Amino acid sequence: MQLQFLGATDTVTGSRYVLDTGHSRVMVDCGLFQGYKALRLRNWERLPVDPARLDAVVLTHAHIDHSGYLPLLVRNGFRGRVFCTMGTAQLCHILLPDSAHLAEEDARFANREGFSRHHPALPLYDGADAVRALRRLEPSHYDTRVAVAPGVEAEFHRAGHIIGSAIVTLHAGGRRIVFSGDLGRQQDVVMRAPEPVRAADYLLVESTYGNRVHPEGDPLDLLGEVVSRTIGRGGSVVIPAFAVGRSQALLYCLYRLRQQNRIPPVPVYLDSPMAIDATEVFALHPDELRIERADCTAACNMAILVQSVQQSAWLKRDRAPKIILAGSGMATGGRVVHHLETYGQDARNTILLSGFQAAGTRGAALAAGARELRIHGKQVAIRAAVAQIETLSAHADANELMTWLGGFGQAPRQTFVVHGEPAASDALRQRIERELQWPVAMPEYLRSYPLD
């Protein structure tokens, strides 16, 4: 039995792992690489494993860096089932077609403007590929074992990261292989804490914030201060926000601030069809939330929904103070890029980053102090203020990761630190060795490891 790492090594994107028992092959997560061009180019490379020889895929959650490669996997021959929670299945029905739409839209825009090196520019996959992938989904319940391949069962436990997110345990050959997926916070604004797992023979743990501790402070205070200061000088707040999870948390915070009269009564626009649909799914799973159902409903209903491209274009012309939440969360694509091009050039405005920004993304460049961004083939000056709220992160920080790891009754035979930039992963590796005395390693890209 062996486990091959096809992504999320030395990076926070492209989560893909393949368990080969000798009789069955199961892929856990099937994500896209994002960020640096060198990483994104991996999406176009031939997969080292023949998709037709995979028996099943198991998803920890729906974020594109964990699910976004599925349409390509199916197009290239995968015919098995994709096992996940109900929440993940519902969100994939939103995220995968949107990912395909964005890829097609970007290709059309590149061809129209003529800034692509490829003629014609082609999308990684299209809407038809996404539809075929969605037909493979097999929703499952939390806390229930399900047979996913000959000799392999999967079990899902709540990870507290987004709706439907799960810690996955594969039971195979008498071994328990646990995949943390993305772990949520112990005290998240809206989500319940990740459930403890008591036992694993082999463990893969994420390390997005493996070298950092989230700053203390109430996110409402920080958000309210940024909004009030910006609106006070006649500006608007543009928030690149992940459509799933972050947008809903931000809406809840803005709802609370408005309830308490702590921010001016300016309109709040949710400029992301995907986030709009995801917000509807969010309200269907109160059992995964720590907030009251009535507050969840009110928060989800407070925004002005921007569906069409024409409505989004109107927002760029309207100079009245406002708050715009738009995808994507790292400003890698989507409607927020157009808003950054427009609002980023006005010093009255604020670009508010509300979560982790992977290296190589526009969001990471802004967080590092860049005053110029490359957008649609040209350099755009950024004169707007740039602020960042890290207390809204949906990822456990280093201390919270160690708290979750401390719930195991005994040391796994081997722990693999994944899904982190090298410095973060290595910092968590050292803490696990020092504080828990567990065998731990940082796996190498494409390498297979025996699970004896």
Image: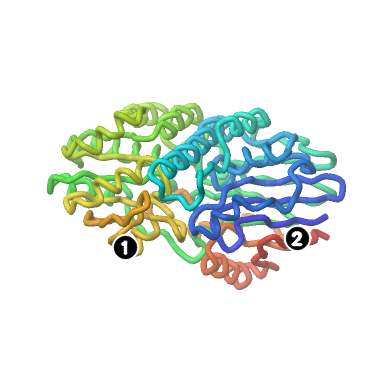
Residue, x 65% and y 28% (percent of image)? Answer: 135
The image position of residue 201, as x and y in percent, is 75, 56
SS of the residue under disc 1: loop
Question: How busy is the neighbourhood of tag 2: few (under 14 within 10 Å), some, or many (20 plus)?
Answer: some
Q: Amino acid at mark 2?
A: Ser
Indicate how the structure is coloured in the image: rainbow
Q: In terms of depth relative to the viewer, which is nearer, 426 or 196?
A: 426
Residue 72 image point, x, y percent: 63, 41
Can you tell which quarter of the image residue 280 is in? top left
How crowded is the residue under tag 1: few (<14 C-alpha within 10 Å), some, or many (20+)?
A: some
Mark identifier at residue 436: none
In the image as oriented, which residue stretches furthest toward the left?
A: 233
Q: Position of residue 274 (x, y in %)?
A: 44, 33
Residue behind mark 1: 370
Counting every numbered tag in the picture gives: 2
Vertical comparison of 175 with 137: above or below: below
Q: Label 2: which residue?
A: 448
Mark 2 or mark 1, earlier in chain: 1
Q: Residue at x 77, y 43 (%)?
A: 54
Residue 136 image-quadrant placement: top right
**Which amino acid lies under the numbered mark 1 shown in the image of this protein?**
Ala
Quadrant the C terminus occupies = bottom right
Q: CA distance from mark 2 to mark 1?
A: 39 Å
Q: Is residue 259 visible?
A: no
Residue depicted at 50% across the width and 46% down the height: 119
Judging depth in this view, the residue of 123 and 57 nearest the camera is 123
Image position of 383 with respect to 149: above or below? below
Could one spot residue 427 in this view of the protein? yes
Kindly give the residue lying farthest to the right in the view shown.
23
